[in-house]
Structure formats: C-alpha cells, structure tokens
Amino acid sequence: MKNKLIIILVGLAVLIPLSIKLLSSNILNQNDMKFELIELPYAADALAPVISKQTIEFHHGKHLQAYVNNLNNLIQGTNFETADLETIVKESEGSIFNNAGQVLNHNLYFLQFSPTGGGKPSGRLAQAIDAEWGSFENFQKEFEAGGMGVFGSGWVWLAADNAGKLSIVREGPAGNPVTKGLKPLLTFDVWEHAYYLDFQNRRADHLNSLWKIVDWKTVESRY
Ligand code: MN
C-alpha cells in the first residue's frame, strides 16, 4: 500500500512538470509561427451563391490553413525562416515552394472578392485592359478561356510587367507570376476544391460567375 503510494507520488512528480513543459513549448511554438491564416474581410456566407459558405469554410478554413501550417513547419531551420512570403515563392523549390505559392496565391485570391463587388475596373487599369484586349468584355472572355486552358489544378492570372503592360498568365498548381518578374493583380483558382461543391465539374460556369464578386478597387490597388 505504502509502496504504491510512493510510486504514484513519484509518477506525479515527473508527469506534472513534464506536461507543463510540453504545454508551454506548444504555446511558444504557436506564437513563433511566422505565417498566419488571413482573416476574410467578409462573412463566410457573404459571397453566396457565387461561392457558398461551405466552399469558403473548406477552402479558407481547411485548405489554406493546411498550406499555412505546412509552410511554417517546412521553413523551420532553413534559410527561409526569416524571409517574406514573396521572396520564398521566388527563391524556393519543392515542398516549400508548393506551400508558399499556395499561401500567397490564396491570400491574393480571397482578398480580391467582395459581396458588393462586380462591375468593371476604372481608371488606369481599365485603360490598360482596353489597350490590350480592345474591351473589358473581350478581356473577360480571354481570361475565362485562360482558366479553361489550365489542365488540372492551377491558376489563371492577370499580371502586369514593370511598364504596366498587362498579360493573362496560366500557372500550374502553386504558380504565381512573381516568379516571372510580373506583378499579380487578379487570379481565379481553378483547383476543383475552389468550385466542386457549388458547380461540380462546371468550371466554365464557375469562372463566369466569379466576375460578380471581383472587388476591382482592390485589384486596381495592386496595379
Ligand atoms: Mn485553392
């Protein structure tokens, strides 16, 4: 009886400090995490029916969160530990590139939408679109075709070079025009996770409906 009590007491004396140590190191690690999941500037159901609440919850809350977590874990102890996101995308390869690209791409993607979006761009961006594609409607057609032309998972981008000249750029799974020295302005995610719950296999219908929620003020501010 007495022996058992001693064993229990010794056990507690070891386990309690150990669990406190593990708990506090977990909390510390959380605080050390470099990249964080962006907060959406709209409610999860605010973009429906173009993008449903369920898609936002999975796409932002699960997919993007996983890319953020992976990236934070992968850069630990590497040269990228203190680098900013764009630098990591430009200079890394393999798993770090894939996860950093996804974080950068999704940040740009989610922040370019608004429940009061839609309509047309204005000012300098509108002029540059007209100069390149003749009209906004023609640009929309070309951009959607760009998205349809991505085989499998990827992204279609409106990008600008240093002189402000615009182009439509198709990219693979984690690609971003920054790797080509271009400025990313607008992007449609054509991974199936972006639209399958709402449009199933109808990628064209999804791309066409996205124009209703594009926040052109945000896109213009990137130009
Ligand atoms: Mn996505």
Image (tube, helix red, strand yellow):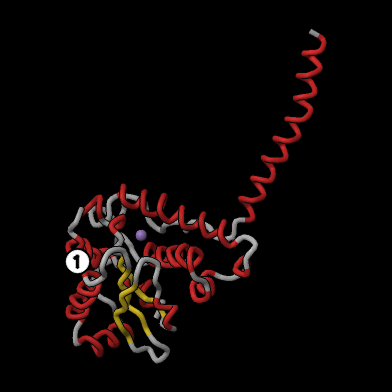
Q: Is residue 63 above or below residue 155?
A: above
Picture coordinates of residue 3 (x, y %)?
81, 13
Picture coordinates of residue 146 (x, y %)?
24, 74
Q: Nearer the viewer, residue 39 or 70?
A: 70
- Cβ of mark 1 under 8 A from ligand 1: no
Please state, as top left, top right, bottom left or bottom right, where the C terminus lies in the image: bottom left
Picture coordinates of residue 119 (x, y %)?
23, 71
User: Horizontally, is 90 left or right of 129 in the view?
Assistant: right
Q: Tell me what residue is drawn at x 27 percent, y 51 percent.
A: 52
User: Horizontally, is 85 left or right of 46 in the view?
Assistant: right
Q: Is residue 68 above or below residue 130?
A: above
Please state, as top left, top right, bottom left or bottom right, where the N terminus lies in the image: top right
Q: Tell me what residue is drawn at x 38 percent, y 62 percent.
A: 110
Q: Residues within 10 Å of mark 1 (few under 14, many from 20)?
A: some
- Using the rendered view, name the quadrant where residue 188 is placed: bottom left
Picture coordinates of residue 77 (x, y %)?
65, 62
Q: Tell me what residue is drawn at x 42 percent, y 64 percent.
A: 102
Q: Is residue 178 above or below residue 43?
A: below
Please tell me how many numbered marks the rendered image carries: 1
Tell me which amino acid carries mark 1. Answer: Asn
- Using the rendered view, name the quadrant where residue 78 is placed: bottom right
Q: Nearer the viewer, residue 146 or 1?
A: 1
Q: Where ligand 1 lies, by quadrant?
A: bottom left
User: Horizontally, is 5 left or right of 206 in the view?
Assistant: right
Q: Which residue is mark 1?
A: 208
Q: Secondary structure at mark 1?
A: helix
Q: Tell me what residue is drawn at x 26 percent, y 70 percent.
A: 150
Q: Is residue 89 above or below residue 33?
A: below
The residue lying furthest to the top in this view is 1
